[in-house]
Image (cartoon, rainbow, N blue to C red):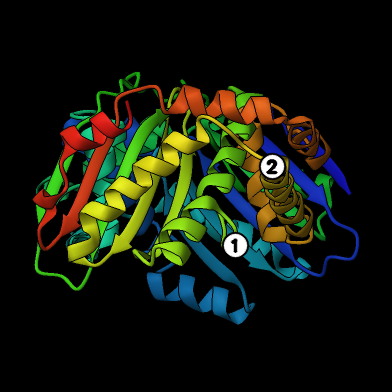
Amino acid sequence: MTFKATKLSNGFHILTYEMPGAQSVAINLIAKVGSRHETEHESGISHFLEHMAFKGTKTRTAKQIAEEFDAIGGQFNAYTSREQTVYYAKVLPENTYTATSIIADIIQNSLFTTEDIAKEYNVICQEIAATLDSPDDLAFEKLSEVAFENQPIGRSILGTTETIAKFGTKDLQNYVAKHYHADNMFLSAAGKVDHDDMVKIAEELFAFTKGRDAEFAEAKYVGGVSLISKELEQSNILIGFESLSYLEVEAYYHTQILSLILGGGISSRLFQHIREDLGLAYSVGAFNSSYSDTGMFGVYAGTSHENLPKAAAALCDEINKIRVSVTEEELERAKAQIRASIVMAEEKSSYKSEEIGKHFSIFGRYDGPEVILDYVNRTTKEDILAAARNVFKGKPSLSVVGADASSVSYEDIVKRLG
């Protein structure tokens, strides 16, 4: 398998990963801009812009865009995160040019008409409403909000109905001009792809000008509490802690392994004790989300209303235990999970296209799977204990959504965690 990178004279990066035996091509256009780059009055605009990319350009109507992709049997979509916006496609090799030309068109020539903005406003309002109606989604949203209070990184990627109602054609055009420039964009492709051909396609289709890197406010974890009482069938609880940046590469993988041991599978501590032994929760687990300057580690459970205080106590107990000891067997199982996921993902062109693009956009290089596997294989029990002590030393954040959210005491959680 061959990775190649070319930087055009304007700063635009073209990245490819040729996969022998692949019969498809996955294409990603990655913009290094997301919700944390927004000002307060721009809240939700990165996501809104991503939606508007499908609404028609100077050369194609929205229907024509849809018909062209269906005509080649392609898969096409986009998503927004806190630090990136990604447009992606998967097609047969002979349709690489067509797919890339559509992506180039919607990025550079979208019309952003007043009529289309009004329609998409209603669509995104429904998306916001769906989040508010989903107890687990709402709990996660509120956890970030209280952990990074009054900061872009803590705000919802969707924005609010109030902020997105103010967006107009000029707002979207100005946001594109500010952030969608050559130095901030990465075109990646993986599968049955020829690097030189991809470079030629990029030189023909993209006319990005140079610009400055997107700026954002440094994240400051503050921690806090959100208790939302709603009439629901189940209560959801999350306890979060400040984690670390993905730029701390080796420690990042130690923390990822920690999350697997604690709550990453059916053999994990949280699953085995809280679900299997105690029968307190149907869904239970742990996660680690990292950004360029901070991160969030959390544990969660979905439980019955009457068992909410018990589930909270059990989550705290498992956190305390993992700060003290980790077995060799647990470590080896977690390593095996990561090794298997990496090796199996290597077979997927969609995964590889996104991986090389994101990795290069963050580090300015691509470290292959052998580098990651080396970090994983060298990890010791002492590394995991150090990661646990580092993550769980700080102030916790608490988010609860349930019929009686106040049945969980934040002060009690702080006390239990020492």
- Image spot of residue 324 (x, y percent): 53, 30
- Image spot of residue 174 (x, y percent): 30, 35
For the residue marked with disc 1, what is the amino acid? Ala
Q: Residue at x 57, y 58 (%)?
A: 265
Using the image, tell me which numbered label, if any, was put on residue 353: none
Quadrant of the frame with the C terminus: top left
Secondary element at tag 2: helix
Residue designated by label 1? 89
Q: Do the numbered discs 2 and 1 sit on residues whose CB atoms are within 8 Å?
A: no
Residue sitting nearer the eye, 126 or 326? 326
Q: CA distance from mark 2 to mark 1?
A: 37 Å
Residue designated by label 2? 331
Residue 2 position by quadrant: top right
Q: Is residue 149 visible?
A: yes
Residue sitting nearer the eye, 255 or 15? 255
Q: Residue at x 18, y 29 (%)?
A: 150
Residue sitting nearer the eye, 412 or 344? 412
Q: Nearer the viewer, mark 2 or mark 1?
A: 2
- Residue at the limit of the structure toward the front, as seen here: 277
